[in-house]
Every structure is written in C-alpha cells, then in structure tokens.
Image: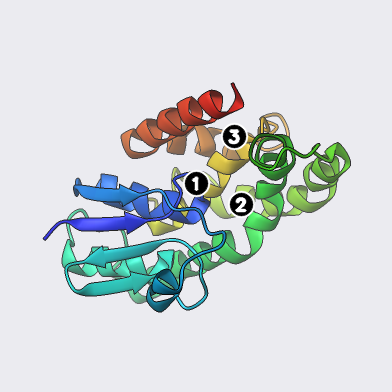
Amino acid sequence: MSLKLIGAAISPFVRKVRVVLAEKALSYDHDPMVPFGVSDEYKRMHPLGKIPVLVDGDKIIPDSSPICVYLEKTHPDPALYPSEAYELARALWFEEYADAGFIAGTIIPFQERILGPVFFKREGDEAKVEAALNETLPEHFDYLERELGENDWLVGNRFSIADIATGTQFVSFSHGRATVDAKRWPGLAAYVDRVFARPSFKAIIEEEQASLKSMAG
C-alpha cells in the first residue's frame, strides 16, 4: 500500500514532511488539499482540521511532527533523528522552535506579499513585513547564528530534522521575497544556502516557485 500525503504543498508543515519523504527516497501520492472548509471526513482524520495528514494503508497519522517520527521509525535509513539522548532532545527542540515560534516571523513576508494578494485577492500590508524583518526576526536570527557557530548543521553537525524544520520556514520566508542579511548574519545566510542546495529541498523549492508563478499569472 502506497503512502498518501494530504495537504497543500505550500504549507511549511507539508513541506517538512515532503523533505523527509525525499530524504528517505519514498514514493507517495499527494492530495494538495487546502485547510479551509474541511469536510467532516477529514476532521475524523485530523480533529483540528489542519494539514498535513499521512495515510499508510489503514494507518492515519495527523500533523507533521508525528508523521516525521513515524517515517523515521518505519524507514530508518537515512537517519534524520540523532540517536544520542541530548542531541535528540536538541533536534526536537529546534523542530518545536521552528514550528511554533520561528514561523511567526518567517511567514509574514509570504502572507503579506504572496498569500494575501495571490490567493485571497487582498492587498498585502508591507508595514507588517517591515515589523517582522526589523523587530521580530533579528532576535531569532541572532539565536540561530549563535547556535550554528562554526558548524554546518544545527545538531551534532549532521543534517537532521532540526534543519528540515528550520529550513522549511526559511523557504516560506524566501517565497515572500525576503533574505537573511549575510553581512549581519554570515553563518546563518550560508546555512540557508546550504539547506536550499540540498537535493531534497532544491527540487521542492523549484516546484513551489513554478506553482506560485503560475498562480500569480
């Protein structure tokens, strides 16, 4: 039975799962459902009505973090979660940080410059973008720059779920025509370039860019 992923590709949480699937070279069917006006049937799969959901035969797994753990346990190679206790805790922290905190800033340029004008036909609020860039995000960028230090990756200096979760938020940020100032945060800017150059990310980013360009006309 093939895997089926439900959720619009442009969602950072769907993207996170898609990167994990790509890293593990797993084939899957994709239903690009948007999380608006979801059916009762879907709510039986995800009671919160959010995306994504993964279906594996008769198994239903809602939400990106449980899905990624499930994929790691069912397809352990290559490993995307550290085995050592402290490093695992750190990786899970960065995943939570990206999913629940960092997103509040990185999503704003995408919401105001792309999502609102293209999908909802409303004018974007550039003041919100400036506030995110100048007030919300610098503290996050300082933190990530500090945590990276001289390393290529966030945890144990090897690519992991920490980088996937963090990287997917930077993809949304990039879609919103925003970049990390390489003069102020050189390590972080190089890190983002490294993440985006990874084949799993690169293919997904190119696909999303083409889709957004098509939607924008």
> Residue under circle 2?
144
Comparing labels 3 and 2, the label whose residue is closer to the camera: 3
Image side of residue 133 versus residue 11, left or right: right
Q: What whole-number distance in Å separates the C-alpha atoms at marks 3 and 1?
A: 12 Å
Q: What whole-number distance in Å separates the C-alpha atoms at marks 3 and 2?
A: 20 Å
> Residue under circle 1?
167
Task: Examine the image and state in which quarter residue 68 appears.
Answer: bottom left
Q: In the image, residue 86 lies at what x, y percent?
A: 41, 74
Instruction: Say which amino acid is labelled 2.
Output: Leu
Q: Is residue 190 above or below residue 107?
A: above
> Which label number is shown at residue 3?
none
Extreme-top residue of the structure: 217
> Residue under circle 3?
175
Which residue is at 58% across, 42% downward? 172
Q: Secondary structure at mark 1?
A: helix
Q: In the image, residue 215 lies at what x, y percent?
A: 55, 29
Task: Examine the image and state in which quarter residue 6 appears.
Answer: bottom left
Q: What whole-number distance in Å separates the C-alpha atoms at marks 1 and 2?
A: 12 Å
Q: In the image, residue 95 lies at what x, y percent?
A: 49, 63
